[in-house]
Amino acid sequence: MSRSSTALATPQLADVTLTRDDMGFIAKLVYEQAGIVIREHKEAMTRGRLARRVKALGLNSVAEYCAFLKTPQAADEIPELINAVTTNHTSFFRERHHFDHLRKEVLPRLLQERSGRRGRVRIWCSAASSGEEPYSIAAVSRDVLGSRSDVDFKILATDIDTDILMKAEAAIYPSDQFDRLPADVKPLLKLEPHSGRSDARISEDLRRMIAFKRLNLIEKWPMSGPFDVIFCRNVFIYFDTQTKASILDRFVTLLAPGGFLYLGHSESLPQPHPQLRLIGRTIYERLP
Ligand SMILES: C[S@@+](CC[C@H](N)C(=O)[O-])C[C@H]1O[C@@H](n2cnc3c(N)ncnc32)[C@H](O)[C@@H]1O
C-alpha cells in the first residue's frame, strides 16, 4: 500500500494515544454499563473503536473523549460508546448444529404439544447482532411450521447495540454473504433481490416472525416469559463469571420446564446449574 493510501485510510486524528489511565477508565465504564470485560491485550482494538467516536464528535484525542465522558453532558454518548465497543461478528447458520437440533428435535415436539389448543411458542434470541442468527431461527421455524396458523409463534430478538439492531431490522445483506451457505439451508431464508443483484433481503414472511428490541443483558428485563427456547451465543465470552452466573439464573427463571438454552460452541456454564441438563454440544434442557 502506498503512503498516500495509508494516510487516506487512517482517521484524521490529532492524537489516538490511549494512556493506561484512559484505558482503565473506559474498561470500567464499559463493564459497569454492559458487563463487557475489555482485557489489556485488546488495547489496539479499543483504540481503533474509540477513534471512531472521537472523530464523530469532532474531538482531537482519545484523552479529550475520556474527559468528555466524565461530564454530565455525556449521558447521550454512553450508548454510542457501547455501540462502538461491541463485537458484532455473526453469520447465517453459524454453529449450524444448533439450528439442526431446533429444526429436527425441538420444533416438531413443541408443535405437537401445542397443537389444537391455540398454543404459543416463544423463542428469545438474546444477542441477535445484525440479524443473521434470528433470521436463521425464523427460517428453520417457518420450514417446520409451514402454513399452520393454530400456533401463536413469535421470536424476540434483542441486543444492546442500537446501530446493529437497525441493520438487523432492515434485513438487507450483501448477496455474496449467502454464497457459502449449504444448499439445503439457503432456500429456507427465502431471499428477495434488493438494489439490483448486489444485495438480498430476507423475505417479509420471515421478517414478520421477529420483534427486534434493545435489551441490555445485565439490566432488568421487561419480559415475564416463559420462553421455550433461548439462544445466548457468543456473548458470554465477553462477561466475567459473576455476570454469566447471574444472567444464567435469570434465563432459567424465564425458560419453560423442558425448554432449551443454546450457548456458543466455545462457551460453557460458569458452573453446573441444578436446573439445566447438558443434552448436546452447548445445548441445555431446563429440568421440570
Ligand atoms: C459476537 S456477537 C454474537 C452474535 C450471535 N449471537 C452469534 O453467535 O453469531 C455478540 C453480540 O452481543 C451483544 N452484546 C454485548 N454485550 C451485551 C449486553 N450486555 N446485552 C445484550 N447484548 C450484548 C453485542 O452487541 C453483539 O451484537
Image: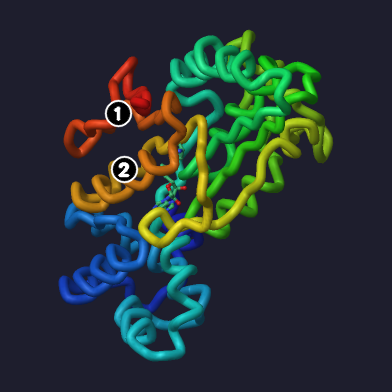
| Direction from residue 67 to residue 172 in the image, left or right | right
Q: Secondary structure at mark 1?
A: strand
Nearest to the observer: residue 1 or residue 271? 271
Q: Secondary structure at mark 2?
A: helix
Gap between marks 1 and 2 measured at Cα: 10 Å
| Direction from residue 257 to residue 183 in the image, left or right | right
Q: Residue at x 80, y 35 (%)?
A: 204
- In the picture of the structure, the residue carrying the numbered disc 1 is 276
Q: Amino acid at mark 1?
A: Leu
Nearest to the observer: residue 288 or residue 43? 288
Up-down relation of residue 12 to residue 39 (above or below): below
Residue 20: tell me if it is visible: yes
**Of the image marks 1 and 2, the number of the one nearer the N terminus:** 2
Q: How is the image coloured?
A: rainbow
Dots 1, 2 in contact, CB < 8 A: yes
Q: Position of residue 117 (x, y in %)?
A: 71, 24
Q: Position of residue 191 (x, y in %)?
A: 75, 27
Q: Which mark is residue 248?
A: 2
Q: Position of residue 155 (x, y in %)?
A: 62, 37
Nearest to the observer: residue 122 or residue 102? 122
Packing grade of label 1 (10 A; few <14, some 14-19, many >=20) is many
Q: Residue at x 29, y 23 (%)?
A: 277
Q: Residue at x 46, y 56 (%)?
A: 221
